[in-house]
Structure formats: structure tokens, C-alpha cells
Image (spheres, helix red, strand yellow):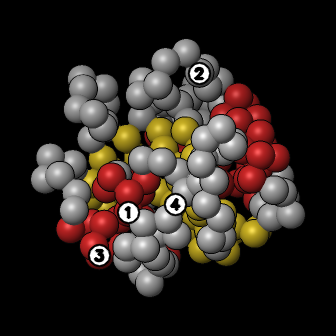
Amino acid sequence: MILIALGSNLPHPIYGMPRQVCDRALSIMAASGFTIISRSRWYRSAPVPASEQPDFINGLVSVATVLDPPKLMGKLHQIENQFGRKRSFSQTARVLDLDLIAYDENVQEEPAWPVLPHPRMANRAFVLYPLLDIAPDWTHPKLGCDLNSLISGLSGEQICVPDD
């Protein structure tokens, strides 16, 4: 299962507010050769680590693609660039953030790129709750933990709620 997280906490001048940005990113992903197998609900989450940034809209999709992990990451960065994403500092407000969370059962450590599964995904409510929507039986390929165990280990300060 190939898992990609989407997030936005800034509006785009053409596509609108963060939820519309994420919807448009899904359309562009589909038009770029990704087959979207399933997708989570959208979630509203506070920035991690806590900051004065606006809340994020986050979601997760399972996709099929012929691209290997490095080429897939390159394609995700191209899509982010179409939305004006600038990679200046980590953990800043952004119009669009696309992260490769997992690529089947692959485990890749640095210096390999990308690191798989995503190195911080097990500690992020805004990844785990959407993942629970689409793959409740998923197990972290490196840690061997199921989703419920990962979620129960989250710090209580992370806010992540469905954005219905």
C-alpha cells in the first residue's frame, strides 16, 4: 500500500482555502497518473510543534503508481511547486504539503531517499487518524506496531478532528 499525506494551512490565490487546495491537489494527482484507491476524510489539526500558524487541513490517500519511491517523491514535489510551495524552512505554514508516508512494506534508512516509512509519521495524529479511516489494520513496517498502539502513544497535546 502506497500512502501519501496531504496538508495545507494557507490559502491559494486561485484554488482557495486549504480544504479546496487539498481537493485540487487530489485532482492533479489523479491527472498525473496516480490511481487513487482510497482516501480519508479531511481533518483539522493544530501545527506540530505548536505555533501561531493557522490550523492545517490534512488527509491521506492510498494510491497505485508505477513510480519507484524517489521518482514518486520527485512527482510530489513537482505538484507542490505547481501550488507555489517554497521549501525554505521545515515546519512552516504552507499552501501544500505532500508526504510519502509508506511505500508497501519498504523500510529505507538514511542516506537512502526517501526515508520509509516517513520518519515522523508514527508520532503525528494528523497522519494516524486519516490512516485509520482507510487502512485500520495497517501495521508500521519498521516498528511492528498497529495503528491503535501508535495512536494510544500520541501526546495528548495534538489536536486532530474531522473537518466535516
Looking at marks 2 and 3 on the same chain, the residue that comes earlier in the sequence is marked by 2
Residue hosting label 2: 87
Left or right: residue 96 compared with residue 2: left
C-alpha gap between disc 4 and disc 1:
9 Å
Residue designated by label 1:
128
Q: Secondary structure at mark 4?
A: strand
Which mark is on residue 148?
A: 3
Q: Is tag 2's residue or tag 1's residue first in the polypeptide sequence?
A: 2
**Residue at the image point whose x is 24% and y is 26% from the top:** 51
- Disc 3 and disc 4: Cα gap in Å? 17 Å
Sequence-wise, the earlier of marks 1 and 3 is: 1
Q: Of marks 3 and 4, which one's residue comes earlier in the chain?
A: 4
Q: CA distance from mark 2 to mark 1?
A: 24 Å
Whether residue 25 appears in this view of the structure is yes
Is there any visible trace of residue 23 in the rendered image? no
Q: Quadrant for the C terminus, please.
A: bottom left
Q: Quadrant of residue 160?
A: bottom left
Residue 157 x %, y %: 14, 46
Q: Which residue is tagged 4?
A: 60
Q: CA distance from mark 1 to mark 3?
A: 9 Å
Tell me the kind of residue under disc 1.
Answer: Leu
In the rendered image, residue 144, in percent from the top left (x then y), is placed at 43, 73
Query: Front-most of 155 and 126?
Result: 155
Q: Amino acid at mark 3?
A: Asn
Label 1: state its secondary structure: helix
